Amino acid sequence: MTSVLYDAPGPKAKARNWIYSGIFLVAAAAVLWWVLSALADKNQLDADKWSPFLDGQVWTTFLLPGLGETLRAGAIAMVIALPLGALLGIGRLSDHTWVRSVVGAWVEFFRAIPVLMLMLFGSAFYVQYTGVDSEVRPLYAVITGLVLYNSAVIAEIVRAGVDSLPRGQTDAAKAIGMRKGQVMTYVLIPQAVTAMLPALVSQLVVILKDTAIGGAVLGLAELLSTYRQISANFSNIIPTLIVIAAIYIAVNFALTSFASWMEGRLRKSKRSTGAVVPADQINAGENTGGS
């Protein structure tokens, strides 16, 4: 019996897979035991290190406000970066050379600069040329850096998503008299959404996590930065970081689960082509003359 991707394993291959799985589980258990032993030796598993997280005041004073700031910065950056990235991606597919050149230069420029540097530039810009209050300046700088960098990456995801569609889609639309804008709006983009969705969700997760850079460098009161106050009060740095990591995992898991559900719904619709954006297309960065 075979599948589309590979031949079904025989008895020897199955036995080999069971052995490999057993070795992996034993190795994982050994690593986990070593980590727990190291934490126990440093008294990091003592009840007094973890008991603060059973107190609602730690959550209402530090963790939940920090999570709220993380979600606020991430959500604002997503709301701005997604449509901006979509417009830039469509611009990269323009039939006009000057549009492709200008948009391509913008995308490649901001995609090549570290997001931390963009945040620092944003902070310096708001200090020198605006009257933004110092209390909200870190939030503005973080959002600026996230939008500039991630809109450039999303533009490449959009370009690659449209390019992943069969060329016959464009030819058929043009054959019935549709203009380039109509082809993009009514034919290509709706179908490409499903292909782009996994890569887009991955980038949204990156946006959410990168808010922590603003807390470390610019003083944004986001989730990760709360470990300083908590550990200073309870001397439990490692337990605090573990709890914060668990919160990040839970939030990002919820985001990816929702996206998986949405992707499943889209793939069942007639708009889906079953295409998926390859990573090499996103990273290729070549200018295309339209689709």
Image: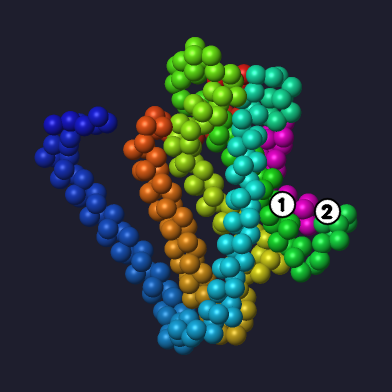
| Contact between labelled residues 1 and 2, with CB atoms less than 8 Å apart | yes
The answer to whether residue 223 is seen in the rendering is: no
Q: Is residue 275 left or right of residue 209?
A: left
Which residue type carries mark 1? Thr
Task: Pick the quarter of the image with the N terminus.
Answer: top left
Residue 269 in percent (x, y) is at 36, 36
Q: Quadrant of residue 218?
A: bottom right
In the rendered structure, find residue 207 and report the number of the disc placed on it: none
Whether the magenta-drawn stretch holds residue 114 is answered as yes
**Residue that mark 2 sits on:** 125
Q: Residues within 10 Å of mark 2 (few under 14, many from 20)?
A: few
Sequence-wise, the earlier of marks 2 and 1 is 2
At 65% from the left edge and 48% from the top edge, which residue is drawn? Answer: 80
**Which region shows up in magenta?**
105-125
Classified by dominant secondary structure, the portion drawn in magenta counts as helix
Which residue type carries mark 2? Phe
Query: 129 or 223: nearer the eye?
Result: 129
Describe the element under mark 1 as helix, strand or loop.
helix
Describe the element under mark 2 as helix, strand or loop.
helix
Residue 143 in percent (x, y) is at 68, 55
Image height check: is 67 above or below 45? above
Q: Is residue 158 left or right of residue 96?
A: left
At 37% from the left edge and 69% from the top edge, which residue is drawn? Answer: 34
Q: Residues within 10 Å of mark 1 (few under 14, many from 20)?
A: many
**Residue that mark 1 sits on:** 144
